Image (cartoon, grey):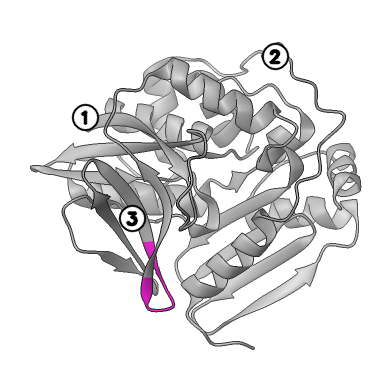
Amino acid sequence: MRTEPVKDRVIDRFLRRRYRRVRPNRECQISIPRAPEVAIAVGSKEILDQYLEALDLKPQRADFAFLREIVQRHVARLAFCSVGPRLGDALPLDVASLHDRIVVRRRGGYCFEHNGLLYEMLEALGFEVTLYLARVIYNRDIQPGLTHRITLVHLDAERYLVDVGFGPLGPDLPVGLSQASVARGGRVFRVAEPRAGEFHLQTLKDGAFFSLYRFELASYGQADCELGHFYSHRHPAAVFVNNLVASRILDGEIRSLRNREYWVITPTGEQRRTISDGAGLQRLLATQFDIEISAEESLLLFQQEP
C-alpha cells in the first residue's frame, strides 16, 4: 500500500485518466431533450428545507462556520457524478430541477448542477453570493472554454471561493481569496493571483502549488452557464459524455469512480478494485455514492465503458 500524501495520489490518478484520448459517443446527438416533470413542489422554502434536511442541518446565522459546514456536508453527502451526461438525460438548470435530481432522486451531478444548487441555497440562507465561470487548466498555460462554474461568497470583508462541483480534486471547505492557504484532511488549497486580475485555485502537489483552474472577476449570468453546461453534457468530445465519474469527499476518505475503476483513498494508503458487471456497478453507486439508477441503466453504463 502506497503512503505518499493523499492529495498527490488523487491528482496523479485523475490527470492520467482525464487526458487520455476521448472516445466520441456516437449515440450522443446535439439536441435539447424535453425536460422531465419535476415530481416535487417547487416552493423555494420547501426546497431549502429538504436541502438542509439532506445535510442534517438547521438554518443558522449566515457566518463562516455555517458556510464551512454546508460545503463539507454537501461534498460528503451529495455525490458528484456524470450519470446524467452518460445516459443522455435532460439536465435543465432551474433550481427545482437541480433539487429534484441531486437531493430527491439521488442522480448526482457536476459543477453546473451542484454549484448552481448551492448558489441558490446560500442566497436563500442570507449569504451574499456571486456567480463566476472558470477555465480548467491543470497547471498548464492554455485557454480552454469556460466549462466550470464556481461561487464567491462575500462575508466579513473577505471573499471566499466555494466549489462543491469539481469532483475528487475539489476543495471541501471555503477558500479565502486573501488568505495564504487553507488545509483539511492532508489537502491544502489556496487562491493565487499570478497575474493581475487572473485568479487560480491551487492545491499543494509534490511540495509545490498546482493550478486546477483559473477565473476572472468578470460579469456572468445564467445564459453563460447554459452555454458551458450544454457543451459539457452534450458535445461528443466532452469529458463527462465520454467517461463515467463519481466521487464523494468524506472525513478522512475520498471515494472516486472513473469508468470501471473504483478507488478509496485515505491518508494511510489507497485501495482499488475493478467493476466487473452492470449489477456490481449499480450496487457500488448505491452503497458508496448514494446514487440511484435502475438495473437497465447500470447495464447500459457498464457496456458503454472502454
Dot 1 or dot 2: first in sequence order is 2
Residue 18: % across, % down: 65, 54
**Does dot 2 land on a helix, a strand or a loop?**
loop
Q: Is residue 80 above or below residue 41?
A: below
Q: From this viewpoint, is residue 62 visible?
A: no
* Residue pictured at 33% horizontal, 55% vertical: 173
How many C-alpha atoms fall within 10 Å of the one at disc 1: few (<14), some, or many (≥20)? few
Q: Look at discs 3 and 1 and give the one toward the viewer.
A: 3
Residue 207 among those drawn in magenta:
yes
Instruction: Tell me the kind of residue under disc 1.
Output: Gly
Residue 148: % across, % down: 48, 38
Instruction: Tell me the kind of residue under disc 3.
Output: Leu
Q: Taking 265 as reference, is 205 left or right?
A: left
| Residue 17 figure quarter | bottom right
Q: Which mark is residue 173?
A: 3
Label 1 close to label 2 by CB (< 8 Å): no
Residue 226: % across, % down: 52, 20
| Residue 260 figure quarter | bottom right
Label 1, on which residue? 126
Dot 3 or dot 1: first in sequence order is 1
**Does dot 1 land on a helix, a strand or a loop?**
loop
| Marks 3/1: CA–CA distance | 19 Å
* Residue pictured at 44% horizontal, 67% vertical: 251
* Residue pictured at 31% horizontal, 68% vertical: 183
Magenta-tinted stretch:
203-208
Q: Is residue 55 above or below residue 280?
A: above
Q: Taking 30 as reference, is 73 left or right?
A: left
Magenta span dominant secondary structure? strand
Q: From this viewpoint, is residue 15 visible?
A: yes
Label 2, on which residue? 32
* Residue pictured at 45% horizontal, 21% vertical: 224
Q: Taking 182 as reference, is 137 left or right?
A: right
